[in-house]
Each structure stands twice: as structure tokens, then as C-alpha cells.
Amino acid sequence: MVNEEETRKGPWTEQEDVQLAFYVNLFGDRRWDFIAKVSGLKRTGKSCRLRWVNYMHPSLKRGKLSPQEEALVLQLHTKWGNRWSKIARKVPGRTDNDIKNYWRTHMRKEAQGKKKANMSSPSTTSLSSSSSSSGSPTGADSIPVITTSNATSIGADQCPKVYYSMDEIWKHIELPEEDKIINPVFHNFNEELGSSFSCTSTTTNNTTMITSIWDDNYYSNNTSLWSMDHQYYPEEGNVMMMPSAMTDHHQFDSFNMCS
DNA sequence: AACGGCTCCAACCGCACTCGG
DNA sequence: TCCGAGTGCGGTTGGAGCCGT
């Protein structure tokens, strides 16, 4: 567990995001408590998971729901009620939080609409059918349904990842700091574009440094870091560049996992 | 320009569930 | 079977930014 006293709360910083992304890519998006520990983030596993799932996952869409998505949410809510995660699975690129937030807004608007309608014609019945009852909303049959089978977004689980045995990992954790760190290789740092850099493949002392590219495609003003795709992930090797415990957000260490 | 109300969304909380020892 | 740790889920809250007055 993360020490209560040290646990951070509130908005995530860019630096924390970078660290989290790195460790999720390294260990997968399952072992959240473990990731919280080894990453040095002063966050709980829960908090890490939430940040990843609701904000950083590569397949997430940003921005407002499209009319099609809205229609689908309405349809599925009629079917399943407040089963947000279930609904979200049928709406590619959207999280349960997105759906939930949308629904709250929707309900508020609808409530206001009802209020107005009642005020203008108090004898008319409600237009609403948005509860979790089994009734279908008007026009539900014509609503386009997006199924997971025709979803085109790429989930994190489709990305190649590098995994390590728990023994290797614990061995690494127990290493003294100076044994873990090797010099980072930087290229093309551009202050204006953010922390854009790339690193090259080098071999020193039985340690292979694989290429790991963070360039304008993945981390720039124009393209969010979190729209990264599979190219973000390293393909092979057991050492990679990492952003860790950065005291300022342009400083990177490398992460040596050689066994 | 200033202010207040509203909207949207990120993040937290607590409970439920799962799984391994 | 029981227990504890980890994870998932739904509800709720806080704050930043937008908009109307």
C-alpha cells in the first residue's frame, strides 16, 4: 500500500502521467497496486487505475459524444439502467465515467425540459422514458447500434507489451538506486514542443538499450501524448528509457531491467 | 468589465466482487 | 471455508471554464 501520509490526491500532473504511462506499458494495466509502488508515484493503485482507464487509455476518444453515441447510450440505458461500465463497453472509446457524466447532463436537461413543459401545459404527461424501466424510448428502433465487433479503436490490450516475471521485478526493486540507473540518451529536446525526445539503441555492460521514440507524433503541442498508439510500446529488449521520479519534467532517467 | 449561475469532466469515496493463500 | 488484498463499479463532489446578464 502507498503510505497514507505520502499519498497524493487531486489533479494529475503531466509528469505523473508520463510516469504512469511508462509503467503501464511495462507491466500492463492490471497490477495497479504494484504499479503505484514501483513507479514512485505517490498515488494509490486505485487512483492510477482510474487515471489510466478514464483519461490515459490509448483508445479513448476525447470531446463530446456524437449524436450516434448519445442515441446508443440512451438505448442501452433503457435496456440496462445505470450499468455504466456495461454500457461503456458498447460505446467504443468511451468510459463509464464519460457515459455517467453524459447521463447526468442529459437527465438535468431533461428535468429542466420537463419542468418547462409542466409549466406551459401542466396537464400533459411526461416525455421521459429514460429510467431503467424496460420500456423503449420513442424511435429506439431506428437508433444506429455500434457493436464492439465493428469498433475500430485499438485497445491497450492489442498493443505489444513487455512483461517481466515478478522475481525479476522484485530483484530490480531491491537493487540499490545507483545500480538501476544508467545514463539516459537524449536527442532533439525541443522546449517549445514539450519534452519531445528520442533515444537510440546502445549496448553497455551486458545491457541493451532499446530504441524508444517519443517524438512529435506522440508528445507535442499538436498531438496529445495520450493519443499514443502501438508504436509507443517498445518491441523487444529488457531495458528502456523511462521518465521516473523526475524532479523537473524534462529530466528523465533510464530504467534498467536486465536480469 | 464584473459577477453569478451553469455545464462539464476529472477525480475521490465507499461498497461489492474476485481470487489466491 | 475464511480472510485479506486487489480490482471494478456506481455515486458523488469540486473546480475550471463558459455564458448570460
Image (tube, coloured by chain):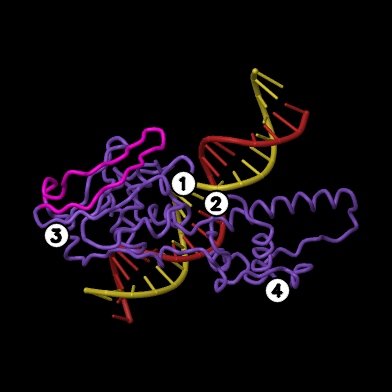
Chain colours: A purple, B yellow, C red
Q: Kindly indicate whether the residues beneath marks 3 and 2 are on one polypeptide chain.
A: yes
A96 left or right of A103?
left
Specify whether residue A117 is painted magenta.
no
Reading the image, the residue beneath label 4 is A134
Query: What span is colored magenta in the figure?
Result: A176-204
The image shows residue A144, relative to residue A2, as above or below, that is: below
Given residues B6 and A61, the one toward you in this image is A61
Magenta-colored stretch includes residue A182 = yes
Q: Is residue A139 left or right of residue A162?
A: right
* Amino acid type of the residue tagged 3 in the rendering: Lys
Q: Residue at x 53, y 59 (%)?
A: A95
Q: Which residue is mark 2?
A: A62
Mark toward the start of the polypeptide (1 vs 4): 4
Mark 1 vs mark 2: in front: 1
**Quarter of the C terminus of chain A within the rendering:** bottom left
Residue drawn at point x = 59 percent, y = 53 percent: A101
**Where in the figure is residue A36, as x and y percent of width and height?**
30, 53
The type of residue carrying mark 4 is: Ser
Mark 1 → mark 4, Cα distance in angstroms: 41 Å
Image position, residue A197 (x, y; %): 32, 43
Using the image, determine if residue A224 lies above or below residue C6. Answer: above
Q: Residues within 10 Å of mark 4 (few under 14, many from 20)?
A: few
CA distance for labels 1 and 3: 34 Å
Nearer the observer: mark 3 or 2; the answer is 2
Give the class, few, some or many, for how many residues have Cα within 10 Å of label 3's Cα (few <14, many ≥20): few
Q: Mark 2, chain letter?
A: A
In the rendered image, which quarter is residue A84 located in? bottom right
